[in-house]
Image (cartoon, rainbow, N blue to C red):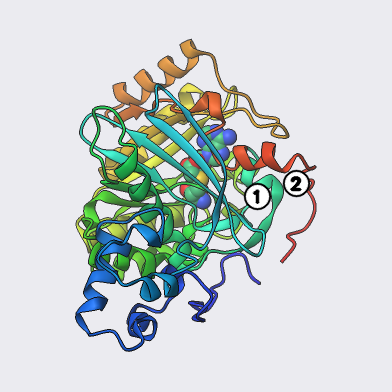
Amino acid sequence: MDPTGQSAVGFGVTATTSPYLDHPDAIGDRLGDEPHYRSDQVREWLYRNPVMTAGEMTNLPADLRARLEPLWPFSVEVEQSTDEGRTVKTLYRTPDGSAIESVLMGYPRRTTLCVSSQAGCAMRCTFCATGQFGFDRHLDAGEILAQVTHANARLRSDPMPRSPSRVTNVVFMGMGEPLANFSNVAESIRRMIEDIGMSGRSITVSTVGVIPGIDRLAELPWPITLAISLHAADDETRESLVPLNKLYPVADLIAAAHRFRAGKGRRVTLEWTLMDGINDTPDQAFRLAAIARELKAHVNLIPMNPTPLAPQQRPSDARIEHFRSEVERHGATVTLRDTRGVDIDAACGQLRVRAAGSTPISITEGATQ
Ligand code: SAH
C-alpha cells in the first residue's frame, strides 16, 4: 500500500470480536431478545462508564454480558508507571499479534492520553523508534477508540493523584501517522465526541505532513486541533529527518497549515524535536519563528529522546534553552514539552522496541508494505 494511502474502514463485525470493533449501528446484533433499552445500557458501559470486564456491568443479564466478551480488542502486555503514578505507558497486543502503545499523563487540570493510530509506521523519520520497525498495519477505529475507553476503565479503578479521573485530552502522537489512516482516525474521533462525550477542542491530530490529509481534516465538522511535526525549516534539513518531505516540501506544508487555520479558525501547533547540531541552530530558530509568526502558530519544542538506532542526539540543556529563547526573541510563542516518562521509554515506539527484543530493520531498506 502507498504509505499515504487509505484503507477501507474495517469494523470486523463477528460475534467473537470485541464490541468496540462493531459497526456503530450494530450494537442491536448483540442484544438478542433483550428489550431495546438495553442498547443504551450497553453503550453507557462501553463508552461513558467503561469497566475492565463485562462481569462488572451489573445491570445487564448474564447472557448479554457473555455476548460482550471478549470486551477488549487487545490484551495488556506491558504496563509501566512512573512520575509517582502520573505517567502510565501501556503496550497492548491484538489477537493478530500487532503492538499498540499508549501513554496516559496526569496533570492538575487535565488527563491526556497519547494514542497510536497504526501498528508501526511507514514514514521512516530517521530519529523515531517506530519508524525503525517499519509498518505493520492500520488500526481499526475501534482499536483507537478502545485505547481511550481502556484508559478510562483503568482511571475509574485506579485514579491518578490530583488529576481528572477520566481522559480529558487525546493526542494522536503515539505510533503511526494518523493522516495515512484517515478514515479510521476520523471515525474514532467521531466516536470520542459523540459516544464518549469528549470535546473536539481537546483532541489533537499530529501529522508528519500528509497534505491531502490536512485538507480532509479541515473538512471534518469538529473543532479539532492540528499539530504539524515540522522539525526543520528548510527542505534539505527536513528531508534528512522526514523522508516524506520529498513528496510534501516545507513551503507546501506551511501553505496547507494556513488553509487549515483559515478554514477551521483553529490555531495550529508546530512540533519541533530538537536534535543536537541539526535543527537547534540560531538560523533554524530564526526561520521557525518567522513561519510561526506568519501562521500565528504555537511552537512546541520536544528534546529528542535518544533511540537505539537513531544517529541524532538530544542537545544539552543549555542549547535547548538557547534555542527556546531565540525562537521567543524572534516573536513566536513557544513552550518546551516536559519529558514525561523518559525513564519508561514513553515515546514513539520505544516500549515496543524493548519488548520485542528484536532487530529493527535498517532505515535504508524499502518499505515493507
Ligand atoms: N506521525 C505523527 C504522530 C506520531 S509521532 C507525527 O509525526 O506527528 C509524535 C511526535 O513525536 C512527532 O512530533 C514526532 O516527531 C515525535 N518524535 C518521534 N520520535 C521522537 C524521538 N525519538 N524523540 C522525541 N520526539 C520524537
Q: Quadrant of residue 66?
A: bottom left
CB atoms of marks 1 and 2 within 8 Å: yes
Residue 153, percent from left and from top: 35, 50
Using residue 22 as the reference point, say whether residue 264 is left or right of it.
Answer: left
| Residue 277 in view of the camera | yes
Q: Viewer-proximal residue, 74 or 192? A: 74
Task: Give the labeled residue for mark 1.
Answer: 124
Picture quarter with the C terminus:
bottom right
**SS of the residue under disc 2:** loop
Give the label on residue 363, or none: 2
Q: Quadrant of residue 154?
A: top left
Residue at the outermost front position: 62
Q: Viewer-proximal residue, 275 or 246? A: 275
CA neighbours of label 1 inside 10 A, class few (<14), some (14 to 19), many (20+):
many
Q: Quadrant of residue 42?
A: bottom left
Labels 1 and 2: the sequence-earlier one: 1
Identified at 46% across, 18% down, the residue is: 320
**SS of the residue under disc 1:** loop
Query: Which amino acid type is shown beneath numbered disc 2?
Result: Ile
Q: Is mark 1 within 8 Å of ligand 1?
A: no
Residue 162, percent from left and from top: 23, 28
Using residue 224 as the reference point, say whether residue 11 is left or right of it.
Answer: right
| Residue 208 in view of the camera | no
Q: Is residue 200 above or below residue 282?
A: below
Q: Is residue 141 above or below residue 270?
A: below
| Distance CA(mark 1)–CA(mark 2) | 7 Å
Give the label on residue 277, or none: none
Query: Which amino acid type is shown beneath numbered disc 1?
Result: Arg
Residue 107, percent from left and from top: 28, 31
CA neighbours of label 2 inside 10 A, class few (<14), some (14 to 19), many (20+):
some
